[in-house]
Image: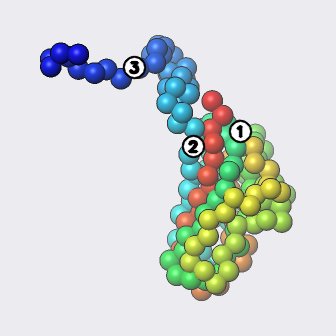
Amino acid sequence: MSDNEESAIPIPKINPNNFNTYVNQYLTAENLKDAAITFVIKDANVAGLKGFLHLPYDCDISGYSLLADVAGNVVIDIWKAAFAAFPPTVANTITAAAKPTLAAAQGVLSTAIGTWTTALNAGDVVAVNVDSTLTLTEVTVTIFVTKRV
């Protein structure tokens, strides 16, 4: 290669005329399948439903983390329902008996989700509920996923 030649990084051929095809081809070509779904709960010191997220893609859950403002206790439940069945309720829990839990700690990272329903589909609505809490006031719930593209 001469001094005035640039080395080129191959770019996969993609169809820019169809945005969904473009995105899917790009994600597949670049292997950008890992993602995170994150909820920041500012009033984690009060039990109850904290919010919803409408999923834009198919994915599978691989783990979760909880990060709190101070060491404390919290038990989180995660619910999901198809958009047509919105809103999800406790009857739609995906965590079974393995709910994300902080016990006298400020953070936890876990892949112990063997009993969970791990498949999430585009259009599903995910809800986060604080089942019980002690000491902390804010918690960030992150659900790690792998996109199905």
* Numbered label attached to residue 149: none
Report the Cα–Cα distance between label 3 and label 1: 32 Å
Residue in the foreground of this view, choosing between 148 and 75: 148
State the residue in front, 10 or 34: 10
Q: Quadrant of residue 25?
A: top right
Which of pointers 3 and 1 lies earlier in the amino acid sequence? 3
Which amino acid type is marked by label 3?
A: Pro
Q: Residues within 10 Å of mark 2 (few under 14, many from 20)?
A: some
Residue holding disc 2? 34
What residue is at 71 percent from the left and 38 percent from the top? 121
Residue 40: x and y in percent read: 53, 64
Q: Residues within 10 Å of mark 3 (few under 14, many from 20)?
A: few
**Which amino acid type is marked by label 2?**
Asp
Say which residue label 1 marks.
121
In the depicted structure, whether residue 95 falls above or below residue 132? above
**How has the structure been colored for display?**
rainbow
